[in-house]
Each structure stands twice: as structure tokens, then as C-alpha cells.
């Protein structure tokens, strides 16, 4: 399963089974139409992410079925898909960063590491970053470094292993 599809399944766990049914040609129209409109939209998006050669995704679904946070998240997923799952965008020049997004600034990076049992402050992240001990930022906007969720998680796991923290 593509990383972007996994993100959809994290928020809509019941869609995992339905995606599998669709991939096996066993999803009937009646079952699909019984889903709420938001679920239908993200299901269609996930099916496209998994099989872009055979599935299509109409942006009209975003317009008709989503609003506010769901719409922003869907747009974020589309950008993430083309950046990380297809690599069609190799050097991204724009990004959507909002509260709760999948990018971490230095403060959020430190908070995540602390939640993992590691003793980090924003200043420690800043110092380690400037010394090259923390991975390069995935994105820099106006001089502010941001790391993707996967980069932060990998670093946290490496540090826990290095320090033998379970």
C-alpha cells in the first residue's frame, strides 16, 4: 500500500477492507453508495493512489464532498502522493504547512522526541541540526526548517536504539 493510502487508512480504518474489495473487483456499487460522502471521496482517492493507471479521481469530488479541514487534508495528500509515492515532484517548491500537518518545526520535533522518552528541547534540536547530528530539513521556508513526519519518526527510532531506550 502506498504511503499516502496508509495515511487515509489511519484516519478511516474501515476503508482498508473496502480498498481490498475494490482491488479484487468485489466492491459492489450499493456498498460504495452506502458510505458517507467524505468516506466515498477518500476511498476514491485511495483507489487512484493505488492504481493510477486504471482508476481516476475527479477533483469535483473534493468540491462536492469536502470542506474545511477535510479539504485541506485532501489537498495535502495529493501533494504528498506526487512528491513521495510517485516522485514526479522531485524538488518541491511549494508546500502546505498548517497546524497538525505532517511537517514538524524544531519545537514539534523536540516534543515528538520527548514523547518517545528522549530528552530534547527546541534549543537542542536547533544545535544538533546546525552541527549535522539531526537529518537535513525536508523543507525550509523563509529560513525555518521543517521535517516530514517520516524523517522525525526515523530519527527518533535511531536515537532510541542508539541509547537503548524501549
Image (spheres, grey):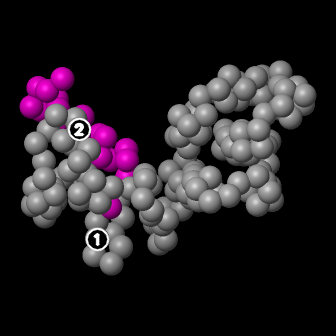
* Label 2 to label 1: alpha-carbon separation: 23 Å
Q: Is residue 46 left or right of residue 24?
A: left
Numbered tag placed on residue 27 in the rendering: none
Question: At 32% from the left edge and 47% from the top edge, which residue is drawn?
Answer: 151
* Element type at mark 1: strand
Most extreme residue toward the bottom is 142
Question: At 80% from the left edge and 57% from the top edge, which residue is drawn?
Answer: 64
Q: Residues within 10 Å of mark 2 (few under 14, many from 20)?
A: few
Q: Nearer the viewer, mark 2 or mark 1?
A: 2
Residue 152 in magenta stretch: yes
Question: At 61% from the left edge and 34% from the top edge, which residue is drawn?
Answer: 12
Q: Is residue 85 left or right of residue 164?
A: right
Q: Main secondary structure of the magenta part?
A: helix
Q: Is residue 17 left or right of residue 77?
A: right
| Residue 70 in view, yes or no | yes
Residue 93 pos. (x, y %):
47, 72
Residue 143 pos. (x, y %):
28, 75
141 vs 133, nearest the viewer? 141
Magenta extent: 146-166
Q: Which residue is mark 1?
A: 144
Q: What is the quadrant of residue 117 in the picture?
A: top left
Question: At 18% from the left edge and 23% from the top edge, which residue is drawn?
Answer: 166
Q: Is residue 80 left or right of residue 102?
A: right
> Is 56 above or below relative to 47?
below
Residue 16 pos. (x, y %):
64, 27
151 vs 32, nearest the viewer? 32
Residue 52 pos. (x, y %):
72, 45
Q: Which residue is mark 2?
A: 115
Q: Residues within 10 Å of mark 1 (few under 14, many from 20)?
A: few
Residue 40 in magenta stretch: no
Amino acid at each position: 500500500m502506498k504511503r499516502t493510502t496508509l495515511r487515509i487508512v489511519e484516519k478511516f480504518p474501515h476503508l482498508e477492507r473496502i480498498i481490498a474489495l475494490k482491488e479484487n473487483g468485489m466492491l459492489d456499487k450499493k456498498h460504495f453508495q452506502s458510505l458517507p460522502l467524505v468516506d466515498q471521496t477518500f476511498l476514491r482517492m485511495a483507489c487512484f493512489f493505488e492504481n493510477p493507471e486504471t482508476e481516476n479521481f475527479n477533483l469535483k469530488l473534493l468540491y462536492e464532498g469536502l470542506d474545511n479541514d477535510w479539504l485541506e487534508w485532501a489537498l495535502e495528500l495529493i501533494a504528498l502522493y506526487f512528491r513521495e509515492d510517485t516522485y514526479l515532484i522531485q524538488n518541491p517548491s511549494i508546500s502546505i504547512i498548517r497546524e497538525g500537518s505532517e511537517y514538524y518545526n524544531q519545537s514539534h520535533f523536540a516534543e515528538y522526541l520527548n514523547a518517545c522518552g528522549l530528552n530534547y528541547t527546541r534549543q537542542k534540536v536547533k544545535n544538533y541540526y546546525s552541527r549535522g547530528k539531526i537529518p537535513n530539513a525536508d523543507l525550509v521556508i523563509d529560513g525555518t526548517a521543517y521535517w516530514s513526519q517520516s524523517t522525525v519518526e526515523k530519527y527518533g527510532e535511531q536515537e532510541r536504539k542508539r541509547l537503548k531506550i524501549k
